[in-house]
Structures are given as structure tokens and as C-alpha cells.
Image: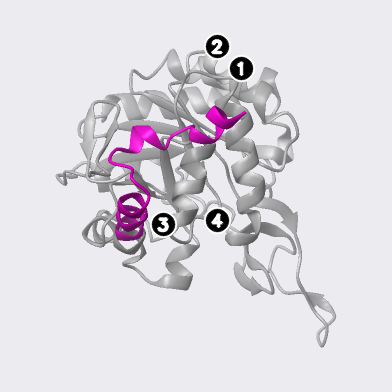
Amino acid sequence: MSIQSEFFGKKMKNPILLASGIIGMTRGSLGMACENGCGGVISKSLTLEPRKGHEGPNIVETECGILNAMGYPNPGIEEGLREFAGWKREEALVISIVGKNAGEFAELAKKVELQKNRVSALEAVISCPHTPGYGTMVGQGTPESVSEITTAIKENCSLPLIIKLSPSVPGEVKAALAAEEAGADAINMGNSLGPGMKIDIHRKKPVLGFGIGGLSGLPIKPIAVRCVYDIYGAVKIPIIGTGGINAGVDAIEMMMAGAKWVSVGTAVYYRGQDVFAKIAKEMEVWMKLNGYSRLEEITGAAHEQI
């Protein structure tokens, strides 16, 4: 029995990716996630120019998950690519980019193309629910916008392209189809859900510095699973399932919905830095107990029962 996976021609020890923006921005911090058991990592999202991000507090635990409003703090695309130029690990490296429009995405893609050595894929994020000028706050989740952005990136970068969609925007199937038709190589479904808010009843103010933020963790898993399920039935390109993967059974469920890979983020907070190894082991145990020998037997299995 094996949970090895293939990621755009690269062998991975398991199908578990570190989600974007969870453990720092440096090569060392992402390398630590690899040492703790993930099969690949997705970098913090990079913009054309450096960004400070939103004022804090940026993260708050709620009764049902975590709200965050980071605002894409990052050193900018050029400094970010310099940081990862020396990536020598065997685990897959995905560079994540975010732009305000198709033109910015095209410029970002050009810069990644020039320094694509050791990079396995490019992820374009069009799904943030809490940063003005980006993502769902400027309507990037529509099929028309998805098609325009996907086309702009594909014209300027030869790396496999992953389009990261939002569970907050109705019509994710149409958006995924638009991405596929425009040349995307995979879908990442999805991002934090929202925006949401937590109020400090003593201060009578929102807790987050920006006021609103995206909800992540186990509470959003049923929505993420449904989105993956619906998209799997519509497109032929592979899917990364993101949202609420906290244990091995969560990963199995997401893969049965149709995900080829899963990405893990909030679970690092709840289960520690070695959560990737824990989830991988739990997947292996579950598969052995239930008579599965390969991941291919699991991906999309829920569709076979219809």
C-alpha cells in the first residue's frame, strides 16, 4: 500500500501540500514543513510590489474555526523569487501569485517564467474574501474574469497553472470550467470562507484590525467538500481540495469527493508543525483497514455510488 502521488511529473511521498501563507515566507520555513511530512509546499502569495498587509490583530480563534485578515503581506515578487531560487528539496514547490487584474497577473507570470527553475507549478489566487483590490472583492471569481486571468498567465508562463477558486462565490463549477477552457492545468478549491466577523463585546469593536476576515478550519469542510465534488463532475483537470483538512479521514473524504491532492493550513495551529506526517500516517492506517492499496482507488470514489 502506498500514498505516493504524482504532481505534474514530480513524485511526491504523499498528496499533502502546505497551503499558502501558513508557515512564513522563507525557504527555511517551508523546508521545515517538508521535514514535518508534507509532499509539497505552496509559497505565500506574491504581489508585484511589497505589501505590509492589514493592521493587526490579523488572526482570531472563534467558537468554530479561525478568522484571518492578513492582506497579503509579502516582500514582492522579485524578492520572493530570489528567496526560493535556491530550493533544492525533493518536495514540490508551488509559487503563488495574486494580482489586481489580468495585466498584473501577466506581469507576475513573466517574472516567474524567468526564474522557474525548481518550481513545480504556479498558483494564481483569485479568491481572497478580505483584501480590497484583490480576489472576490473585485469580482475575480466570475467565469469571465477567471478566463481572462488564466489566459493572461498561460500566455506568459510555461509552468503548470493552478487556479485557486473561492467557496464564497456561487458558480464555482462555471468558474472551474472557464479556467479549464482557458488552459488551466488544475483547480485549487478553495480559500477561506467569508468574509466573517468576531466582535469583542467589552470593547464593542471587531477583533480583527481590518474588521472582517476569512473563516478557515473544520467548519468550512462540508462546503469545500461539496465544491470539490461538483467541480470533479464537470472538469477533467485535477483538483486540490482545501478547507478543513485536520486529520487523515478528512483527507480521504476530500479525495473521495474528487481531489487528487489536499492542502493543509489551519490544522497546523490545532495539531502542530508535524500535522502533515500525522495526516499521512492516518491515511495509511485507514486505507489498510479498509482494503485500499492506492490513492487512485479513492479519488472520486463517491461519484461511483451515484
Horizontal side, residue 63 vs residue 260: left or right:
right
Callout count: 4
Q: Tell me the CA gap for discs 2 and 3.
A: 33 Å
Circles 2 and 3 in contact, beta carbons < 8 Å? no
Q: Tell me the CA gap for discs 2 and 1.
A: 5 Å
Position in image of residue 186 (x %, y %): 45, 26
Q: Is residue 295 above or below residue 30?
A: above
Q: Can I make out residue 241 in this image?
A: yes
Residue type highlighted by circle 4: Gly
Horizontal side, residue 177 vs residue 74: left or right:
right
Q: Which mark is residue 248?
A: 3
Q: Secondary structure at mark 1?
A: helix
Q: Secondary structure at mark 2?
A: helix
Magenta-tinted stretch = 280-306
Q: Nearer the viewer, mark 4 or mark 1?
A: 4
Circles 3 and 1 in contact, beta carbons < 8 Å? no
Characterize the magenta stretch by its predominant secondary structure: helix
Horizontal side, residue 28 vs residue 179: left or right:
left
Position in image of residue 125 (x %, y %): 54, 37
Disc 2: which residue: 181
Q: Looking at this view, name the residue that lies furthest to the bottom.
A: 202
Disc 1: which residue: 178
Disc 4: which residue: 244
Q: Residue at x 26, y 34 (%)?
A: 119
Residue type highlighted by circle 2: Glu
Q: Nearer the viewer, mark 2 or mark 3?
A: 3
Q: Nearer the viewer, mark 3 or mark 4?
A: 3
Residue type highlighted by circle 1: Ala
Circles 2 and 1 in contact, beta carbons < 8 Å? yes
Horizontal side, residue 64 vs residue 120: left or right:
right
Residue 70 is inside the magenta segment: no
